[in-house]
Amino acid sequence: MNRKAFLALAIALLAVFPLAALAQEEPGAPAPQSRTQENLVAFKLLRMTQVLELTEEQTTKVYPTVMRLEKEKHAILKGLNTEMRGLRELLRTEKPEEPKILAAVDNINKMRQMVRQKDEEVEQFLRKNLTVAQYAKYTLFMVDFYRGLSESLDRARRFRDQNLRKKELERLPH
């Protein structure tokens, strides 16, 4: 992707984030976790566009389609999380009802399959719309992206835990 197209995409994304933030303040707006997920997907797609050196034509095809599929996947994941909370609550009861447990497990497995299907749709779409070299770069990019994300989350958790320990120590009488 040439520099001009990349800058245009970056400016468009940067313009969308503040508008999205304003929209979030309205009643019934998505939770901050949902915004974080959307921002992460947008960041991933922006980096992917750079790394794969997509043409303008490829970018106009890939970005909206992958964004749509990721949003659909996110909606499924939200339902999956809700279903898992319900199953945990069922299991905490003194005498869990087996039919309800089995129904919840079936729903969870169906939703997990739906998530895998969305991932496969993305893979198939990209195989059709990228060159072989770009698809190979995509494969490496995804592994590196999620590895880096995992490492960043681990660092953030360690930092949070250190700060919590400091605050606990500060509360102790001297």
Image: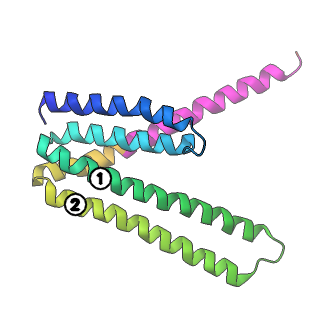
Quarter of the image that includes the C terminus: top right
Please give left or right for residue 161 compared with residue 112 in the image: right
Estimate how packed mark 2 is, as few (under 14), some (14 to 19) or many (20 or more) residues with alpha carbons within 10 Å.
Answer: some
Amino acid under disc 1: Val
Of all residues, the one furthest to the bottom in this rendering is: 99
Asked where in the image residue 121 lies, by quadrant, the reply is: bottom left
Kind of element beneath mark 2 = helix
Q: Position of residue 19 (x, y in %)?
A: 43, 32
Seen in the picture, residue 116 relative to 140 is either above or below; the reply is below
Location of residue 119 in the rendering, given as x and y in whole percent from the top left corner: 34, 61
Picture quarter with the N terminus: top left
Given residues 30 and 162, the one toward you in this image is 30
Sequence-wise first label, 2 or 1: 1
Do the numbered discs 2 and 1 sit on residues whose CB atoms are within 8 Å?
yes
User: Residue placed at 43% from the left, 43% from the top?
Assistant: 38
Give the residue furthest to the top: 174
In this rendering, the answer to whether 172 lies above or below 55 is above
Span colored in magenta = 146-173
To which residue does mark 1 refer?
Answer: 66
Up/down of 84 relative to 32, above or below:
below
Residue 9, position as x, y percentages in the image: 24, 34
The dot on residue 125 is: 2
**Residue 51, magenta (yes or no):** no
Q: Give the amino acid type for the residue marked by disc 2 in the picture.
A: Phe
- 142 relative position to 20: left or right: left
Mark 1 surroundings: few (<14), some (14-19) or many (≥20) residues within 10 A: many
Q: Residue at x 49, y 33 (%)?
A: 21
Kind of element beneath mark 1: helix
Which mark is on residue 172?
Answer: none
**What's the colour scheme?**
rainbow
In the image, residue 153 lies at what x, y percent?
50, 38
Q: Which residue is the extreme one toward the right?
A: 173
